[in-house]
Image: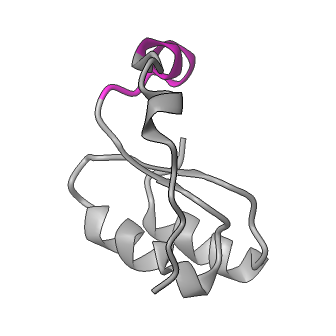
Amino acid sequence: VVRNPVDAEKFASGDPALFREEFGLEDYVLTVGRIESRKNQLLLAYALNGTGIPLVIVGHSVEPDYEALVRKVSVVR
C-alpha cells in the first residue's frame, strides 16, 4: 500500500463552477495522476464507456501507446 495523503482543507474551498464554466461538464469522474498502465485508467475508461459519464484525467502521459488506448475507449472532448 502506497499512501499519498492530501490535505483536504487546502482544497475545501475549491469552486466546481470554474471547471464547469471552462469545460462544460457537470457530472464526471475525476482521476489525478500520470497516465500509465500501472494506474489502470484503461479499465476505468472501459467501465465508464457507454454510461455517458465523462472521464477526466489530470496528469501527463508517460506511455503514449497506453494513453492512446485510454482515449480509444473514452469519450474524448
Pick whichever, 56 or 49, lies toward us. Answer: 56
Please, is residue 8 above or below residue 31 in the view?
Answer: above
Pick whichever, 62 or 66, lies toward us. Answer: 62
Please, is residue 29 above or below residue 15 in the view?
Answer: below
Rendered location of residue 54, percent (x, y):
37, 46
Residue at 54% x, 65% y is 4
Image quarter of the N terminus? bottom left
Please, is residue 47 above or below residue 2 in the view?
Answer: above
Residue 52 vs residue 15: left or right?
left
Residue at 51% x, 50% y is 6
How is colour applied across the structure in the image?
one colour
Residue at 77% x, 75% y is 64
Rendered location of residue 35, percent (x, y):
64, 69
Residue 38, by quadrant, is bottom right
Is there any visible trace of residue 35 in the rendered image? yes
Is there any visible trace of residue 49 in the rendered image? no
Rendered location of residue 44, percent (x, y):
37, 70
Rendered location of residue 65, percent (x, y):
72, 81
- Tell how many labels: 0
Please, is residue 10 above or below residue 54 in the view?
Answer: above
Image quarter of the C terminus? top right
Q: Please report the bounds of the magenta region as a residue range.
A: 17-26
Residue at 45% x, 15% y is 15
Verify whether residue 8 appears in magenta.
no
Main secondary structure along the magenta-highlighted residues: helix
Verify whether residue 24 appears in magenta.
yes
Pick whichever, 45 or 39, lies toward us. Answer: 39
